[in-house]
Image (spheres, rainbow, N blue to C red):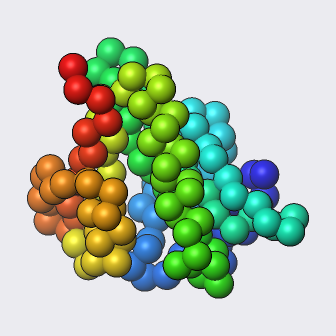
Amino acid sequence: MREDIITLIENNIGNEEEIRVSSTIPDYVDKLMEKAQIITYYSRGSLKGVIAYYANNLETKQAYLSLILIDKRFQSMGIGRLLFEAAKFDLSRNNFLTFDLEVLNTNSRAQDFYRKYNFKLFEEKEKSVIMRLLINKN
């Protein structure tokens, strides 16, 4: 799975979808595999999509979306929706309260995708925005 995720990232990241990491892509994937929840979507033996999120803040019950990426050849086919719904179900089942993410100001396609799933603007930064989804109420 590690190599599949690395290949998916390397083959599908463009200017707007840049991953802001302070290390190499393999190191980033290693960190995800060690500390994040990862849900993958394979079809015909190859990785078509992945979602990775941190659900380890058990005190505040806040989760953070680190990565959702669909192979460009398979976008708009419902894979992102399936991955997102699986993550949301996992977080709800584990009583998480919020699901946060950061997206570039210029990535309107991603922002539109997240708005479809009721993410709301939470904070504006210089080059990005933080969006938040309420999962469970206190």
Residue 23 in sight here: no
- Foreground pick, 41 / 85: 85
**Location of residue 8 in the rendering, given as x and y in whole percent from the top left corner:** 67, 69
Residue nearest the viewer, comparing 30 with 88: 88
Residue visible at 28% across and 21% down? 60
On the question of residue 20 being in view, the answer is: yes
Residue 131 position in % (x across, y down): 24, 53
In the figure, residue 11 lies in which quadrant?
Answer: bottom right
Q: With 113 as the anchor, is 42 left or right in this view?
A: right
Between 14 and 63, the residue placed more toward the observer is: 63
In the image, residue 33 above or below residue 3: above
Across and down, in percent, residue 100 comes to: 31, 45
Q: Quadrant of residue 135?
A: top left
Q: Residue furthest top?
A: 59
Image quadrant occupied by the C terminus? top left
Q: Residue at x 25, y 39 (%)?
A: 134
Whether residue 33 sits left or right of residue 106 in the image: it is: right
State the residue at coordinates (42%, 48%).
65
Whether residue 45 sits left or right of residue 61 in the image: it is: right
